[in-house]
Image (cartoon, grey):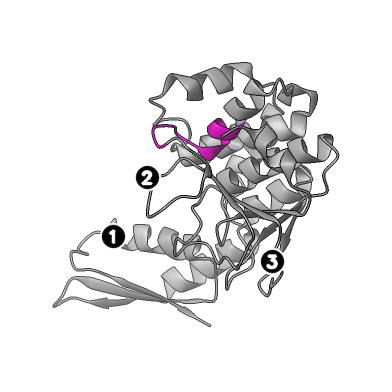
């Protein structure tokens, strides 16, 4: 599939997976930018039960001016639905009906794919997939530093801070992009907000330890699942904790 194939449609909705990460946002942003430059009026949305509340993802959307909106009750049937960083019908994306579907992704294929598809499972990020598709169309990504920065950060987060890159095309994209390196550093260091830090500290200080099982129970206020993961890591790395700990969020 080529990105130019999408230009055959007018009513276009781009949708990434629920609770989107940096790669989902960056790849969808890139497709939105391409379509907009070619005179289309696409909409970029995400759905699901939870609105984005991860600190650095919110900062990414704001600082890079990513035109995405949270549409949990979206019920329209667009002429074309483009799913990015996910595949239509998977459990991690809440999709409704569409007259036509296009899939752009880098994960392993799961189920049947539509005729319009570009899935490259060996790449480190969907950002790389879309960057290469843009390059094939002669689109100058570096004309928009915010877009270039988003694509870099998408690959950065999906490859363990660039430590898991194995495909040469991922490296080609990194070498080609002109980015705001200061903003990338800020985004990589802004995972936890001050409020989330307070929640984490309060929860850890209130732990319950069960010596006979060498286990911890940590109860936290409502927070992003990522923060629960941080607390769990602390618990599992604690001396004399051998059992499976339990980390609950009060909602």
**In the displayed structure image, the side of residue 220 where residue 53 appears, left or right:** right
Please tell me whether residue 36 is drawn above or below residue 57 in the rendered image: above
| Magenta-tinted stretch | 121-130
Q: Going 69% across and 58% down the picture, which residue do you hit?
A: 45
- Dot 3: element: loop
**In the displayed structure image, the side of residue 69 where residue 238 appears, left or right:** left
Q: Going 59% across and 70% down the picture, which residue do you hit?
A: 50
Q: Report x, y in % for residue 19.
A: 57, 61
Please tell me whether residue 14 is drawn above or below residue 199 in the rendered image: above
Whether residue 172 is visible here, answered yes or no, is yes
Q: Report x, y in % for residue 59.
A: 71, 50
Name the residue furthest bottom.
251
Q: Going 56% across and 51% down the picture, which residue do you hit?
A: 21
Look at the image and say whether residue 244 sits in the magenta stretch: no
Q: What is the number of callouts on the image?
A: 3
Q: Which of marks 3 and 1 is nearer the N terminus?
A: 3
**Is 108 in front, or is 229?**
108
Residue at the disc numbered 2 = 108
Q: Which of marks 1 and 2 is nearer the N terminus?
A: 2
Q: How crowded is mark 3: few (under 14 residues within 10 Å), some or many (20 or more)?
A: some
Residue at the disc numbered 3 = 77
- Dot 2: element: loop
Q: Quadrant of the N terminus?
A: top right
* Measured Cα–Cα span from mark 3 to mark 1: 46 Å
**Is 28 in front, or is 20?**
28
**Is 224 in front, or is 165?**
165
Q: Report x, y in % for residue 104.
A: 54, 43
Q: Earlier in the sequence, mark 3 or mark 2?
A: 3
Q: Going 51% across and 45% down the picture, which residue do you hit?
A: 115
Circle on res. 236: 1
* Measured Cα–Cα span from mark 3 to mark 2: 27 Å
């Amino acid at each position: 599939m080529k990105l130019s194939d999408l230009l055959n449609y007018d009513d276009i909705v781009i949708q990434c997976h629920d609770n989107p990460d940096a790669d989902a946002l960056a790849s969808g942003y890139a497709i939105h930018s391409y379509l907009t430059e070619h005179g289309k009026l696409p909409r970029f949305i995400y759905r699901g039960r939870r609105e984005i509340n991860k600190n650095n993802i919110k900062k990414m959307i704001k600082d890079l001016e990513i035109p995405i909106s949270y549409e949990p009750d979206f019920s329209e049937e667009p002429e074309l639905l483009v799913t990015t960083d996910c595949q239509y019908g998977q459990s991690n994306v809440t999709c409704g009906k569409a007259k036509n579907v296009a899939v752009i992704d880098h994960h392993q294929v799961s189920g049947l794919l539509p005729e319009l598809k570009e899935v490259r499972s060996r790449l480190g990020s969907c950002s790389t997939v879309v960057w290469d598709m843009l390059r094939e169309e002669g689109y100058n990504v570096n004309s928009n530093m915010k877009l270039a920065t988003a694509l870099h950060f998408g690959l950065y987060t999906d490859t363990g801070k660039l430590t898991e890159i194995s495909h040469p095309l991922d490296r080609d994209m990194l070498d080609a992009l002109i980015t705001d390196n200061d903003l990338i550093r800020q985004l990589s260091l802004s995972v936890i907000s001050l409020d989330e830090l307070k929640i984490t500290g309060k929860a850890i200080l209130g732990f319950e330890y069960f010596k006979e099982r060498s286990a911890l129970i940590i109860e936290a206020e409502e927070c992003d699942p990522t923060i629960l993961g941080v607390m769990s890591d602390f618990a599992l790395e604690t001396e004399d904790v051998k059992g499976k700990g339990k980390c609950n969020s009060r909602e």
